Image (cartoon, coloured by chain):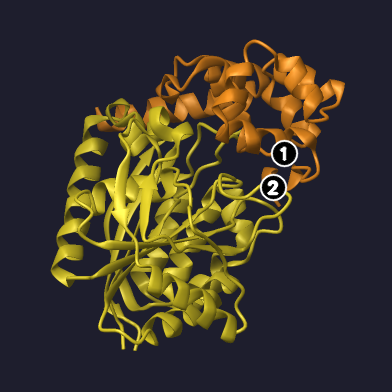
Amino acid sequence: MAEIVAAMAMTHSPGLTGWFTRAPEDDQHLALQATAEMRRRLEAARPDVVVMFSNDHLLNWPINNVPEYTVGVAAEHVGPADWFDEWLAMEKYRVPGHAPLARFVVNEAARHRLALAWLREMQFDDGISVPTHYLNPDARFRLVPITMNCTVPPIPTPERAYQVGGVLKDVLRAYPGPERIAVVATGGLSHEPGGPRYFWVDEAFDRWFLDLLKRGDHQALLRECTLERMEEAGSGGTAELLAWVLVLAFTAGPADVLAYMPAVAWRSGTGMVVWNELAS
Amino acid sequence: MGNVERCDKTLPTNAMMYHVRKDAALRARWLTDLEGLAREFGLGRAEYEAIRDKDPRRLMDLGVHQYYVPQILRLFFGAAQNSNASAALECYRRAFPRETAEAMALQERLDGRRG
């Protein structure tokens, strides 16, 4: 059976590649240091495949038909989508997928009464591209991308994301292969992409949320960090943290917060987190 | 709930933006035939005019999903590294003067704290 070997989370702000040097030098240094440490820990865990949980920014699905979750099932993934080349200041990249695992997840989740849409050619924006740039730049790890809806109403609640995380943990572990799997959440922290507070970050919320992760008390986090609280800290963007809450279900105990930057220049509260202990 | 709850999932502009971002031929027409594009996708006059006028507040009041608003501006101005001198930021400054001023003041404070 497959084994979960690592769990981590990071911001996927397009500023982290697209206009990196516009942030203060301290933030640039901290971001590079923290992502290098994430990569070091990821490599030390020796995963065969990274299952990356992000959100679709209305790129893969039109607004009239947005699934809650979508799995990319391709044998090879190519990014970023053309519209994001300049925005992310990125050349095209290729990452091998893991089609048998991805298809297993879709079908096995259905047997757990969890509906997952799937795409053979999933397009990538910052959600997958930025973390891949920092954590898997040489494409040594196979990738299974899973995107979620956190921007089109009705937005799922943190409780729902945590419940889905629990189901996917069981599904991934049930895969009949020797694969070592790392789970990576991407998105957040506070930001309001395109909204009236587009150029704002909520440092107090971000530090409070990261402190909750450091406490490692999942029930307290679910009780206190409601969807309403996320929306107050930046509508349509802060709820990307639902991916972090989903990955929380794969973990136990406190998270290591490697870095936090209230990076207004990158248009997002920016953080990197690794969990040392995985759920039994 | 937050601003994102104001979007109108049935608004033609939201459907149009999904297709324009994916299609280079449609993107090429943005600067030369915006009115024709709007007609083809069934936009109302108010939607077309809010796009033409690059007005984030009117766009969101009509129900354009907030995520598409900067993308609409990018079609006019390019990416410009999302900088504080960008034309897109100027549009937000006009549409949301208080929120944008607060954000710029915050950035100044944070930069000072690091400097």
Please state, as top left, top right, bottom left or bottom right, where the N terminus of chain A lies in the image: bottom left
Please state, as top left, top right, bottom left or bottom right, where the C terminus of chain A lies in the image: bottom left
Q: Where on the picture, by quarter, is residue B67? A: top right
Residue A46 in the image: above or below residue B39: below
Q: Residues within 10 Å of mark 1 (few under 14, many from 20)?
A: some
Which sits in the foreground, A261 or A3?
A: A3
Judged from this view, the residue extending furthest toward the top is B32
State if disc 2 and disc 1 touch (CB < 8 Å): yes
Which chain can be seen in yellow?
Answer: A
Q: Is residue B69 left or right of residue A46?
A: right
Which chain can be seen in orange?
Answer: B
| Mark 2: secondary structure | loop
* Horizontal and vertical percent position of residue A234: 56, 45
Who's the residue at 54% across and 26% down the image? Answer: B24
Q: Is residue A31 left or right of residue A247?
A: left
Residue A154 in the image: above or below residue A79: below
Q: What's under tag 2, amino acid-wise?
A: Ile
Chain containing the residue with disc 2: A
Residue A180 in the image: above or below residue A90: below
Disc marking residue A63: 2
